[in-house]
Structures are given as structure tokens and as C-alpha cells.
Image (spheres, rainbow, N blue to C red):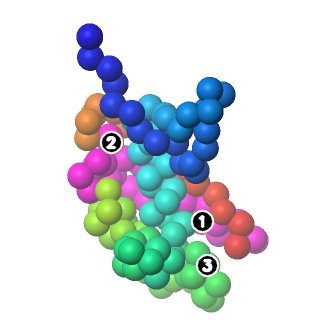
Amino acid sequence: MMTAPFELAYPFELDRRGRTAGTDEKQHVRDLIEQVLFTAPGERVNRPDFGSGLLRLAFEPNGDILEATTQFTVQGALQQWLGDRIELETVAITHHEATLEVTVAYRIRQTAERVVDTFQQGV
């Protein structure tokens, strides 16, 4: 009998038995994308180049150039850090007052499942 690979839940938590909580592949990939999006480069001591710098760009003057730069930066970070797990299709970024919204369309390489997820973060 084969068991499914164990993926850690993000954020780290304990399950009802007091053990490290796990999750399925689809949720794990979503969690990884969220980590890349909302981690600033330099935030992780042992991996200082990890992250997208997305939140830093949210405070720049809004406009077409910023939108294109942000989209390019986010796509590059997702491809660099998760290119072996996902096939990135599109990234759309919108800014509504104090909320940054990122919609990512991708295919999970392991299952070939197509997913569209939206991530929100207050700025």
C-alpha cells in the first residue's frame, strides 16, 4: 500500500492529535506560492534572495509602468522558486485601496491539474 507524500501545512501548526499538521499537494503548492509572494527578499536569513518583493512595490506611485514591473517581478520569483512544482500561466495584480490582490493561474506539474488562486494582503 502506497501512502501519499506528507506535505507540511503552512503556516506551521499542530493537528488535533498534537502532531505536525499536513496537507495535500494542491494546498501545499498554494501555500508555497503565498510564501513566495509575501516574503520580502532579505527576510529569510539563510535564503536572503527568496521572495518576490511584492509588498515593497505596493507603496510606489500607481501606474502602467508599476503594474508591468510588479507583474514581471512576481512572475520571475514564482518561476525561480517554484518552476519545478508549477507551470505558470498568468499573473494578474490589482490594488484596491489598502488591499493588494494577486491572481495566479498555473498547472501543478505532479498532477497536471490547472488551478487559479487569488491571494490578498493588506498593505
Q: Residue furthest right?
A: 97
Residue picked out by circle 2 = 107
Q: Amino acid at mark 1?
A: Thr
Q: CA distance from mark 3 to mark 2?
A: 27 Å
Q: Closer to the observer: label 2 or label 1?
A: 2
- Check the image and report above or below for 115 versus 71: above
33 magenta-colored: no
- Magenta range is 83-108
Image quadrant containing the N terminus: top left
Magenta stretch, overall SS: strand
Name the spot of residue 71 as percent of width and height, x first.
44, 71
Residue picked out by circle 1 = 94
Residue picked out by circle 3 = 58
Image quadrant containing the C terminus: bottom right
Label 3–label 2 contact, CB within 8 A: no
Q: CA distance from mark 1 to mark 3?
A: 10 Å
Residue at screen point 32% across, 42% down:
107
Neighbor class of circle 1 (other Cα within 10 Å; few <14, some 14-19, many 20+) is some
Q: Nearer the viewer, residue 96 or 111?
A: 111
Residue at screen point 39% across, 74% down:
46
Q: Residue furthest bottom?
A: 61
- Check the image and report above or below for 43 versus 106: below
In this rendering, does residue 92 appear at all?
no
Seen in the image, is 94 located left or right of residue 112? right
Residue at screen point 32% across, 20% down:
3
Neighbor class of circle 3 (other Cα within 10 Å; few <14, some 14-19, many 20+) is some
- Check the image and report above or below for 123 versus 21: below
Neighbor class of circle 2 (other Cα within 10 Å; few <14, some 14-19, many 20+) is some
- Check the image and report above or below for 49 versus 37: below
In this rendering, does residue 66 appear at all?
yes
